[in-house]
Each structure stands twice: as structure tokens, then as C-alpha cells.
Amino acid sequence: MSLSALASAAHTLTRRSDTDPLSYFRPTPPQLEFLKATDRIRLYRGANQVGKTWVGMADTVFRCLGAHPYQYCRPAPIEAHVITVTSQQGIAIQEKCWRLLPKDSILPDTEFVAGKGFRGRQAMVRFTNGSILKFRSVEQGALSLAGSTLHHILIDEPPPEDVWNELVPRVFRNHGTISLTMTPIGKPLEWLKKMVEEKRVRDICAPLTIENTTPIGGRPMLTQAQIDELSQGILESERGQRLFGEWTTTFVEGRVFAAFDPKIHVRDQAPEGNWLVGVGIDHGRESGAQVAILTAMQATEDGHHRIMVLDQVQSDGMTTPEQDAKSILDMLKRCGLRWEDVDRWVGDRAAISRRGGALKSNAMLVQAIERDLRLPVGSWPARIHTAYKPRGSVYAGYRLLQSEMLRGNFTVNPRCQRLIDDLSRFDGRENSKHKHSIDAVRYCLELITRRLYAPQLVRIG
């Protein structure tokens, strides 16, 4: 074959794969088992990186087309819904849907915008055969899902039990189907596990192995070295879930941050260039529980983050809001910063006394900062955000720290002796005295983890 003919064939293949990418979808062995399963309620429970969302989305699009290559399905038109935990997660799954859709099977008014999802008041795909695929989130609440009569529902990551109980009747009248794809992290799932044990839900489990990430007849998508590297970046207590899809976490005696090594991660250095600056504050009632941490963060070219802990302050006993405010502002001065240089302030929820009164709170601290700066009440233009604490956020922060430690992207200034000691000793227990400073660091990480916040870069140095 000549070079021109080869180029023409490659161009034709590319055009076809862009127009009808679903025709080129090749499942892995556990994905194929899921696609062939005819049970009305199916669960694809697997590790990270085993293609859970992809196979769930491919199965849903097949059903909307009315032509499933692996089993009989209801003729089109049908109405299907994709349910995600958050709206932000919904945009990610909409992008995967768009990449799988045969473009000649959808109506011209179905428009996808990268980073925003499908356009319109209700994110949806309208097929030429009359089928409709809508995207909804658990954030909208169980009541918003009531009233719909559907043929198929795909749930990406497990919803709360009350939402599940609202979804099941939606497909009952049409003898429809429900697919659930998930890694069982961050939620109580005893109710779902019980349904599996009672054979009311077909359970297909896909651990992270070379075989389970290799398309049938294709090449492996991951090497054993890559799997081992991923395993090292996962907290030991979560490895069973994230590598094998197990139902529950296992408490492991020992350090949470096994990757932390003071010889490697403790260095006296200052950020240069564009960094995001954060202050995290953990309120507390007992001695030493009030901790504030100053960090600088910067995205790397490979999509990870450099995290530099610059300084910290903590109380030696019960302190007043005025004392806390002064110590935090003094900490900024030691690092050559002003309060205006902080991109995001995040404080814990209020510490409440046994009688119900607030001992420490973000509001009290703001008022004390205003007095220290000699500003009128309510005029400080910054804001201390209350820490964002959805279920699973604690271990998400731990995982991020552990991963960046392994990559060499995490450093702590030597003067942060309290944090250095805590990182070396913290065993994951909720009541550990070593938890407070680590919580303060996690709050700073909202600059990375809280996607709705778009901070302005500050140049340091």
C-alpha cells in the first residue's frame, strides 16, 4: 500500500471513530460480563481505573439506540436517566457520554460544550429514534426525581438510600432496568450489600489487575508497575476498596502517612513564581487544639500539585479570638505576606462548649481580625469559608497528601515542628491528638479540591 493510500485509510478510520466511537468500544472481561448480564438491577463494583463509568455509559447508550450488541433490549424509543452524586461529577460523565455517542444518531439540537456539558435547561441527549437520555444529580434531592416513569437508570457512584428508594419505582411500571457503577468509598452501604446478599442485585466485582484493564483482543491499558505505583499512593486502610472493590475500609494500626519522611520532606524553602496561598484553621476546645496552617500550592505540568507548608501557629491553652487573630497575622508577616495575599481562608465549624455556646468560630475570628487591623465591624473584605466536609472528604485529603509526598511534591518548613510530629505519628483515629494540625492542612487543600472556587494567582518573591 502506498503512503497516500495509507494516509487516506487512516483518515477514514479516524473519521469513522469520531462519528461512531461506540462501534470501536472493546470491553474488558468483567465489562463484558456486565454487558451480558440480563438482571434488572446490576452492580459493577470495582477498583479505581477499571472502566466502571465507561461500561455503564456504553450500556446506557446501547439501550437508547435500541440495539444492544450483547443482549436483547427494549426497542426504541425509551427514556433513560443518568444519576450522579454531584452536578460537577455529572459534567464529567456527560463528556464520556459525548465521546461514545454515534453523532449521526442524535438530533442537531443536542449540543455539547466542553467543561459545561450538554446545553439547555435540562442536560439531555435527544436521539433521532425518539429516545431521550437525561442527566440529573443527587444534589437535586429525592423529590426532584419523583414522578418520572423511566425505562433505564444508570447510577454512577452510590446514592443515599432515600434516593435509591425513590429511583427503583421509576422503572417499575415499564419493567425497566437499573445499573449501578461504583467504588464503595465514603458512604455507608450496608443496605446495598444486603440487597446483593439477598440476590436482589446482580453483583459483578472487578479488582484492579492487568487482565481486568485489558480489552478483549487488545493490549493492556496498565502495566503491573503502574498498578504498583497506584497502590503505593493509596492509604493502606483504603487499598481493599480502591484496588479490589471491597465493601468496607479496614482500620490499619500504624501511621496514615507512611510516605512521610522528615529527611526528605522537611526543607526550608520559599515559593517562587505563581502560587496559591491558603490559611487553614482548626478550632478546638482543649489545650493545643487551636491550629492555623499557612500553605502555598502550585499545579504541575503533569496535573498534580506542589504543596508547601510555610508556617503554623497553635495555642498552648485556651486563647481569646484576639490572641488567635494576632498569632495568625504575625505568622503571615514572618513569611513576608499580608492578609491580602491569601487566596482562601478556611476555618473549621464552630467549637461548642458543653453549655452550647461557641468557644471558637470563624465569625468570632473575623471580628478579632477586624479589631487588630483597626477596621470597622463587617468591613474586612476577605472571608473565612467554613470547611467543606462532604462524606469522604477527610480521606480524600489524606490521599492527596500521601500521593504528593510520594511524588516529592510536598514539603514542610522546619519551624512547623507540631505538624512534622503529627504527620509522623497520626494513626487515623478520630480522637487522635495528632489530628488537628492535619485537619488545618486539609482545609488549605480546598484550593485544589473545591472545584467551584476559582482563586486569583498571587505572585510571591
Image (cartoon, helix red, strand yellow):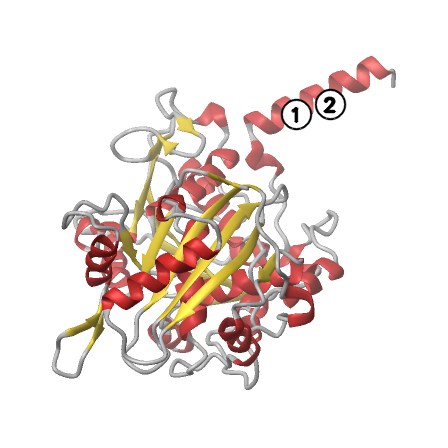
Q: Nearer the viewer, residue 163 or 336?
A: 336
* Lateral position of residue 45 relative to residue 261, left or right: left
Q: Position of residue 170 (x, y in %)?
A: 24, 53
What secondary structure is found at the residue carrying circle 2? helix
Viewer-side residue, 354 vs 4: 354
Say which amino acid is labelled 2.
Answer: Ala
Q: Which residue is mark 1?
A: 14
In the rendered view, tell whether residue 330 sits above or below residue 359.
above
Residue type, mark 1 in image: Thr
Kindly state the secondary structure of the residue where label 1 is placed: helix
Seen as rendered, the residue at the extreme bottom is 253
* Crowding near the residue tagged with mark 1, few <14, some 14–19, many ≥20 C-alpha atoms within 10 Å: few
Do residues under tags 2 and 1 come within 8 Å of each other at their CB atoms? yes
Q: Going by the image, does 85 lie left or right of 271?
A: left
Residue visible at 43% across and 50% down in the picture: 447
Kindly identify the residue that appears in the image at 57 percent across and 33 percent down.
21
Looking at the image, residue 108 sits to the left or right of residue 183; the answer is left
Can the viewer see residue 452?
yes
* Residue 85 in sight in this render: no
